[in-house]
Amino acid sequence: MKQVHIWLFCISLLCQGMLAQTKSTEANSLGNLEENPSPQILTDSISYAKAIRFGTDLYRLVRSQADKNFQGWEIAADFRWLPELYIAFEMGDETHTIQREQINFTSQGSYLKLGIDYNLYENWPGMNNQVYLGLRYATSAHTQQVNRYLVYNRNHFWPDQETDRGHSTGLREGLSANWVEVVAGMKVEVIKNVFMGFSARLTRLLSDQKPENFDNLYIPGFNRKTDENVFGANFNYSLTYSIPLFNGKKAKVPQSGL
Amino acid sequence: MIIKRLFYILTTLCLCFPLHYCEKDDICLNDNLNTPNLIIKFVDKENPTLPKSPNNLLIKALNTENSLGTSFGDSLALPLYIHDDFTQFEFILNAGDEAFENRDTVQINYQRKDQYLNSACGYRSTFILNSPPAYVLQSGNDWIEGFAILKDSITDETSAHLVILH
């Protein structure tokens, strides 16, 4: 039922975007006839309009449907603070069951990422796309549960048999991790106010609270953690909807009128 | 120009993903830490400081087809069964010689404790011997006279953990 609602949300976002597009083209053509403002002012005001964008990560949604060992979602938002600078925010929750060589475990928890995106793409008038680099500070609150494991033993006198209760299985609660991310990505306006985006993130773990007699082999939001180093990587495919906070056209009208 | 560079950066990042998933910690390369065997030393019952090899000893574990073979010196390594807190072995003295064959069934009692190693190797087991560490089941005409603990925590195989007097 929850998943049906998520899909409905995505579809309604798309529909709203299409409606907004048809309305705005009508408004534009009327405006051109009556007021005939200079096109330069119009495009400037649109490209500098402050806007807040809300959206969701499509990869985690699709993977939740396809992979029975993964349940997760992520919402993303950004606010255009300066013409090329955005304050960006992501929040999500993941439950991931992973089978490694000897251990089967479930990592569960939520995460929060906050930072900035800097747009490097020079848009043509009327375009509103982004190719950006960004930074994030992220934190997670998670649990690790060891479901079952095969004891490492080079001597195979006794048949190998998994331990699925007692001993070192069980839940480790109250864990956390902090990391920074360097983000490279793009966002394209596919229909008016609706953006599709991709971002790849290289991460560096700052600190993590280790579970008792186990390790954070996977951290929600961070992705897989290796034994060898503190670096990792993750990515998202976002679908976001932009809500203009200040109408750029209206803001410029008094100036052109004077 | 910047766009072109960014495109290269993004492409490189995408290519990095498969590499990221094939790391050293997928393969267990651990030579030092293993689930340890129980090291047993045979000593003379008259003079416990003197090592004494049992004659033609054959050891069979109960509940398995596997055999540990014959002809040990004065010490041997026994693999403990990790899914129970005891393991039973048949110690057969003078094996093959029907007239003098002497079977003692020994139960070894311990507690298991698992230690996390790393992501590829997972866990290994270590043990703590109970007291008494071992006894002979169905006693009567036993060639084993007694047991003594040398080291009750079994975490490595560098020295003997248990002594058998005979």
Image (tube, helix red, strand yellow):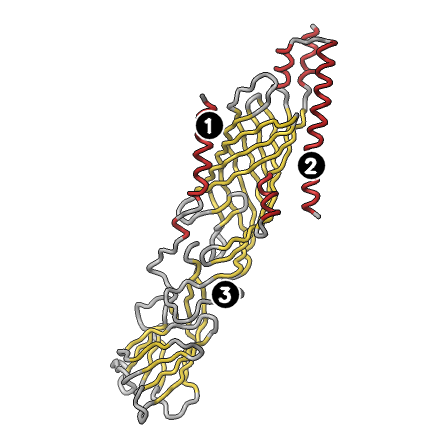
Instruction: Return the residue found at the far bottom.
Output: B99
Q: Is residue A32 above or below residue B111?
A: above
| Residue beneath disc 2 | A11
2 vs 1, front mark:
2
Which amino acid type corresponds to the residue marked 1 in the rendered image?
A: Leu
Residue at image x 52%, y 66%?
A166
The chain carrying label 2 is: A
Depth order, front residue of B52/A162: A162
Which amino acid type corresponds to the residue marked 2 in the rendered image?
A: Ile
Mark 2 and mark 3: Cα distance apart in space: 45 Å
Image quarter for residue B71? bottom left
For residue B57, side relative to residue B132 (left or right): left
The chain carrying label 1 is: B
Q: Which label number is shown at residue B6? A: 1
Residue B84 location, x and y as percent?
A: 48, 73
3 vs 1, front mark:
1
Mark 2 and mark 1: Cα distance apart in space: 31 Å
Residue at image x 34%, y 75%?
B150
